[in-house]
Image (tube, rainbow, N blue to C red):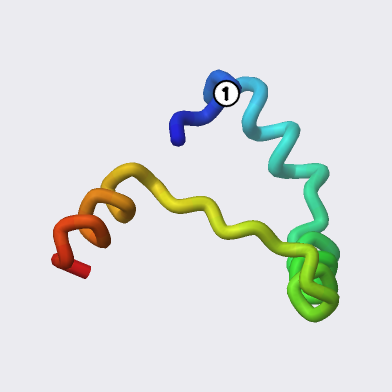
């Protein structure tokens, strides 16, 4: 599934990355996985491989 947002330019990406708290984001992700708040998203390539039996 293609992204619905445009990639950030380098000028916008640097300040965005500088203010992120990756440790907090990872911890939140683990907590969400533990309580089952996850969603699997398959790409069209994965779906095609599974339909043809190549995966």
Spot occupied by residue 43 in the image (x, y as percentages of width and height): 39, 47
Spot occupied by residue 23 in the image (x, y as percentages of width and height): 78, 68
- Looking at the rendered image, the quarter that the N terminus falls into is top left
On the question of residue 23 being in view, the answer is no
The residue lying toward the viewer, choosing from 27 and 20, is 27
Residue at (57% x, 59% y) in the render? 40
Which of the 4 image quarters holds residue 22?
Answer: bottom right
Q: Is residue 41 left or right of residue 51?
A: right
Whether 24 is drawn above or below 42: the answer is below
Spot occupied by residue 3 in the image (x, y as percentages of width and height): 52, 29
- Looking at the rendered image, the quarter that the C terminus falls into is bottom left
Whether 47 is drawn above or below 11: the answer is below
Whether 1 is drawn above or below 45: the answer is above
The residue lying toward the viewer, choosing from 44 and 3, is 44
Spot occupied by residue 21 in the image (x, y as percentages of width and height): 81, 56
On the question of residue 40 being in view, the answer is yes
Residue at (31% x, 55% y) in the render? 46
Q: Residues within 10 Å of mark 1 (few under 14, many from 20)?
A: few
Which of the 4 image quarters holds residue 16?
Answer: top right
Residue that mark 1 sits on: 4
Which of the 4 image quarters holds residue 36?
Answer: bottom right
**Tag 1 secondary structure:** loop
Whether 35 is drawn above or below 37: the answer is below
Residue at (15% x, 58% y) in the render? 52
Residue at (82% x, 43% y) in the render? 19
Q: Is residue 54 left or right of residue 25?
A: left
Figure disc tally:
1
Q: Is residue 8 left or right of residue 50?
A: right
């Amino acid at each position: 599934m293609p992204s619905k947002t445009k990639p950030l330019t380098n000028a916008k990406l640097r300040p965005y990355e500088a203010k992120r708290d990756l440790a907090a984001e990872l911890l939140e992700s683990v907590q969400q996985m533990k309580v089952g708040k996850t969603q699997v998203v398959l790409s069209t390539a994965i779906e095609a491989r599974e339909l043809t039996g190549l995966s």
